Image (spheres, rainbow, N blue to C red):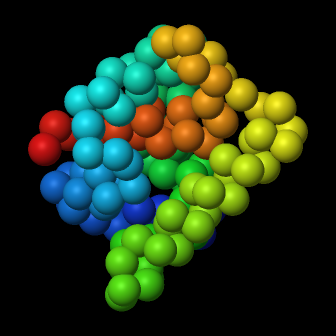
Amino acid sequence: MAGSLPIVRAATGDERTAAVRGLLPRDFRAARALGERYLEIEPAERSADWLAGELFGDVSLLTADPRGLDPLKRRIRAGCARDFRQGDLVLLEGWWLARTEARLLALCAVLPTP
Protein backbone atom coordinates (compact mmCIF):
# COMPACT_ATOMS: atom_id res chain seq x y z
CA MET A 1 0.00 0.00 0.00
CA ALA A 2 2.29 2.70 -1.22
CA GLY A 3 1.57 6.11 0.17
CA SER A 4 -0.54 4.84 3.04
CA LEU A 5 0.18 5.37 6.70
CA PRO A 6 -1.46 2.39 8.39
CA ILE A 7 -1.97 2.22 12.10
CA VAL A 8 1.22 0.23 12.67
CA ARG A 9 3.45 2.84 11.06
CA ALA A 10 1.67 5.75 12.72
CA ALA A 11 2.22 4.90 16.35
CA THR A 12 4.64 3.50 18.88
CA GLY A 13 4.40 -0.14 19.97
CA ASP A 14 2.32 0.69 23.05
CA GLU A 15 -0.08 2.89 21.06
CA ARG A 16 -0.44 0.22 18.37
CA THR A 17 -1.24 -2.46 20.88
CA ALA A 18 -3.72 -0.22 22.71
CA ALA A 19 -5.48 0.65 19.46
CA VAL A 20 -5.79 -2.96 18.35
CA ARG A 21 -6.97 -3.96 21.83
CA GLY A 22 -9.75 -1.39 21.45
CA LEU A 23 -11.04 -3.39 18.50
CA LEU A 24 -11.13 -6.75 20.31
CA PRO A 25 -12.89 -8.53 23.14
CA ARG A 26 -11.33 -8.18 26.56
CA ASP A 27 -9.44 -11.46 26.42
CA PHE A 28 -6.35 -10.28 24.54
CA ARG A 29 -4.45 -13.49 25.39
CA ALA A 30 -7.07 -15.61 23.66
CA ALA A 31 -6.98 -13.25 20.67
CA ARG A 32 -3.19 -13.57 20.47
CA ALA A 33 -3.41 -17.38 20.71
CA LEU A 34 -5.92 -17.56 17.85
CA GLY A 35 -3.80 -15.12 15.88
CA GLU A 36 -0.82 -17.43 16.30
CA ARG A 37 -2.92 -20.35 15.03
CA TYR A 38 -3.85 -18.32 11.95
CA LEU A 39 -0.19 -17.47 11.35
CA GLU A 40 0.66 -21.17 11.44
CA ILE A 41 -1.71 -21.54 8.46
CA GLU A 42 -0.57 -18.32 6.75
CA PRO A 43 3.07 -17.75 7.83
CA ALA A 44 3.73 -15.31 4.98
CA GLU A 45 1.35 -12.85 6.69
CA ARG A 46 3.53 -12.50 9.82
CA SER A 47 4.14 -8.78 9.41
CA ALA A 48 2.52 -6.06 11.49
CA ASP A 49 2.91 -3.53 8.68
CA TRP A 50 1.37 -5.83 6.06
CA LEU A 51 -1.51 -6.90 8.30
CA ALA A 52 -2.27 -3.30 9.26
CA GLY A 53 -2.23 -2.27 5.62
CA GLU A 54 -4.68 -5.04 4.72
CA LEU A 55 -6.95 -4.26 7.66
CA PHE A 56 -6.83 -0.49 7.88
CA GLY A 57 -5.47 0.73 4.55
CA ASP A 58 -4.81 4.44 4.72
CA VAL A 59 -6.72 4.96 7.98
CA SER A 60 -4.12 5.88 10.58
CA LEU A 61 -4.03 6.77 14.22
CA LEU A 62 -2.91 10.23 13.19
CA THR A 63 -6.09 10.89 11.22
CA ALA A 64 -8.55 8.61 12.99
CA ASP A 65 -11.79 10.07 14.25
CA PRO A 66 -11.04 11.86 17.54
CA ARG A 67 -14.16 10.28 19.04
CA GLY A 68 -12.38 6.95 19.11
CA LEU A 69 -11.89 3.89 16.97
CA ASP A 70 -15.16 4.14 15.07
CA PRO A 71 -13.58 4.44 11.58
CA LEU A 72 -11.41 1.39 12.21
CA LYS A 73 -14.33 -0.60 13.65
CA ARG A 74 -16.46 0.23 10.60
CA ARG A 75 -13.68 -0.90 8.30
CA ILE A 76 -13.27 -4.21 10.18
CA ARG A 77 -17.05 -4.84 10.17
CA ALA A 78 -17.23 -4.12 6.43
CA GLY A 79 -14.30 -6.45 5.77
CA CYS A 80 -15.89 -9.26 7.78
CA ALA A 81 -19.21 -8.84 5.99
CA ARG A 82 -17.43 -8.89 2.60
CA ASP A 83 -15.49 -12.03 3.58
CA PHE A 84 -18.67 -13.87 4.59
CA ARG A 85 -20.42 -12.87 1.35
CA GLN A 86 -17.42 -14.09 -0.68
CA GLY A 87 -16.86 -17.23 1.40
CA ASP A 88 -13.36 -16.09 2.42
CA LEU A 89 -13.41 -17.93 5.74
CA VAL A 90 -10.79 -19.54 7.97
CA LEU A 91 -11.36 -22.46 10.36
CA LEU A 92 -9.58 -21.85 13.69
CA GLU A 93 -10.11 -24.02 16.74
CA GLY A 94 -13.46 -25.21 15.41
CA TRP A 95 -14.76 -21.69 14.61
CA TRP A 96 -15.32 -20.28 11.15
CA LEU A 97 -13.97 -16.73 11.04
CA ALA A 98 -13.93 -14.11 8.34
CA ARG A 99 -10.38 -13.72 7.03
CA THR A 100 -10.48 -10.07 8.14
CA GLU A 101 -11.21 -11.15 11.71
CA ALA A 102 -8.46 -13.78 11.58
CA ARG A 103 -6.01 -11.14 10.36
CA LEU A 104 -6.98 -8.82 13.19
CA LEU A 105 -6.22 -11.64 15.62
CA ALA A 106 -2.92 -12.23 13.80
CA LEU A 107 -2.07 -8.56 14.25
CA CYS A 108 -2.55 -9.06 17.99
CA ALA A 109 -0.10 -11.93 17.85
CA VAL A 110 2.67 -9.92 16.19
CA LEU A 111 2.37 -6.75 18.27
CA PRO A 112 4.33 -6.34 21.50
CA THR A 113 2.70 -7.78 24.60
CA PRO A 114 1.09 -4.97 26.61
Query: Would you say 60 lies left or right of 29 here?
Result: right
Q: In this view, does 34 lie above or below 53?
A: above
The single residue placed furthest to the right in the displayed view is 86
Residue at image position (61%, 63%) is 75
Residue 93 in the image: x percent, y percent? Answer: 49, 12
Query: Would you say 45 lies left or right of 63 here?
Result: right
Q: Which of 19 and 94 is in front in this view?
A: 94
Residue 97 in the image: x percent, y percent? Answer: 61, 30
Residue at image position (43%, 84%) is 65
Q: Which of 51 and 105 is in front in this view?
A: 105
Q: In this view, does 41 lie above or below 111?
A: above
Residue at image position (26%, 37%) is 27
Q: In this view, does 76 lie above or below 100?
A: below
Q: Quadrant of the C terminus?
A: top left
Q: In this view, does 98 lie above or below 75?
A: above
Specify the quadrant of the image occupied by residue 29.
top left
Specify the quadrant of the image occupied by residue 89.
top right
Q: Quadrant of the N terminus?
A: bottom right
Q: Which of 45 and 78 is in front in this view?
A: 78
Q: Is residue 39 visible?
A: yes
Residue 51 in the image: x percent, y percent? Answer: 51, 43
Residue 60 in the image: x percent, y percent? Answer: 45, 71
Residue at image position (16%, 55%) is 14
Q: Can residue 16 be seen in this view?
A: no
